[in-house]
Amino acid sequence: MRITLLAGGVGGAKLAEGLAAICPPENLSIIGNIADDEEFHGLWVSPDIDTLTYSLADMIDRKQGWGLADERHRVLAGLERLGCDTWMSLGDQDMATHIFRTQLRNQGVRPSAIAQTIAESLGVKAHILLPTDDPLQTRIKTEQGWLSFQEYFVRERCQPDVLDIRFKGAEESWPTPEAVQAIKNADLLLIAPSNPIVSIAPILAIPGIRQAVAETRAARVAVSPLIGGRTIKGPADRMLVASGFACNSLGVADSYAGLIDGLVIDDEDQAEREELEARGFQVLTTSTLMTCAEDKNRLAKDVLAFASTVGVEEAATC
């Protein structure tokens, strides 16, 4: 069975790990968010793609959920002594990834090929795909003006009120053929418990991607990132509200209107199940909190079993 997962960073990586642990990784394609990418110290940094890669390689810093384990920050300390802004925390080993990526980009190598090369060099067998090779950046409007996502998320710690969200470059971008093919050929299309507004929406904003998701014959299942109307980490709850959606499972479902057949929600949100089903969604309630490998694997198994109820007979097993 071929599975395609649309994913952001931390939450997406956790479900990706669960899927990779119980399914043949060569049958798993992960289309990651690149709209958080930004240049720091002359290096191209791709936070969500790196989080997916490091997690699947079992090299992630488990405590913070991003970056590499056993990391040091001597390069960053040196840059700080020279007067550079160092609010974006980049570890010494992590810098090597960004140097390598930037060198290849400067040589004209496709970003998609670079991502796959990095993944393969770290022993990742699942296919990590970029939705586009073109520049794409999430921009957040606040009272301070327009900020990049990293400026809003890391430097400002998500404190400013969100007035508007745009995906700069989306209209001019082209989808990668690998991403479109992975969606079209999937037996099961999953949307990870990532931020619907700034992790998944940028992927869907690329011309051709949303259409492929809408037209695929695969069963389409999303996992809500909310538990009891709140996020475990990140600003997804506030961003749903800022984008005009309710901060609950119904709002998550509305944000994916026309793109999903089923929704997985946490047991704490059981009360919303009846209304979701009245809107035509098939619903699974289970524990969606992933704090360890066992949680990730269990949720992945639950999701695959649930997929059999939305039209994929083979989805319960890999």
Image (cartoon, rainbow, N blue to C red):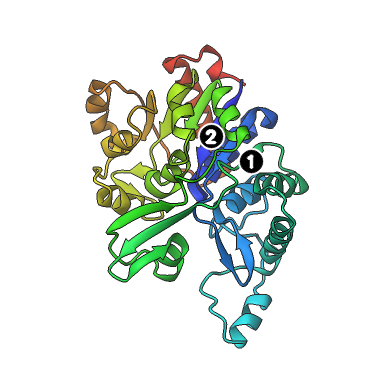
Locate the C terminus and report the quarter of the image it occupies.
Answer: top right
> Which secondary structure lies at badge 2?
strand
Q: Position of residue 292 (x, y in %)?
A: 54, 45
Residue drawn 51% across the image and 74% down it = 87
Which residue is under mark 2?
5
Q: Position of residue 83 (x, y in %)?
A: 57, 86
Locate the N terminus and report the quarter of the image it occupies.
Answer: top right
Mark number, residue 54: none
Mark nearer the N terminus (1 vs 2): 2
Front residue of 176 and 123: 176
Q: Residues within 10 Å of mark 2 (few under 14, many from 20)?
A: many
> Residue lying farthest top?
313
Res. 197 visible in picture:
yes
Task: Judge whether 136 appears above or below 161 on screen.
Answer: above
Res. 294 visible in picture:
no
Residue drawn 41% across the image and 36% down it = 287
Front residue of 110 and 129: 110
Q: Position of residue 284 (x, y in %)?
A: 37, 26
Corner quadrant of residue 267: top left
> Which secondary structure lies at badge 1?
strand
Mark 1 to mark 2: distance in Å? Answer: 10 Å
Labels 1 and 2 touching (C-beta < 8 A) = no
> Residue lying farthest front?
172
Which residue is under mark 1?
128
Residue 232 appears left or right of 292: left
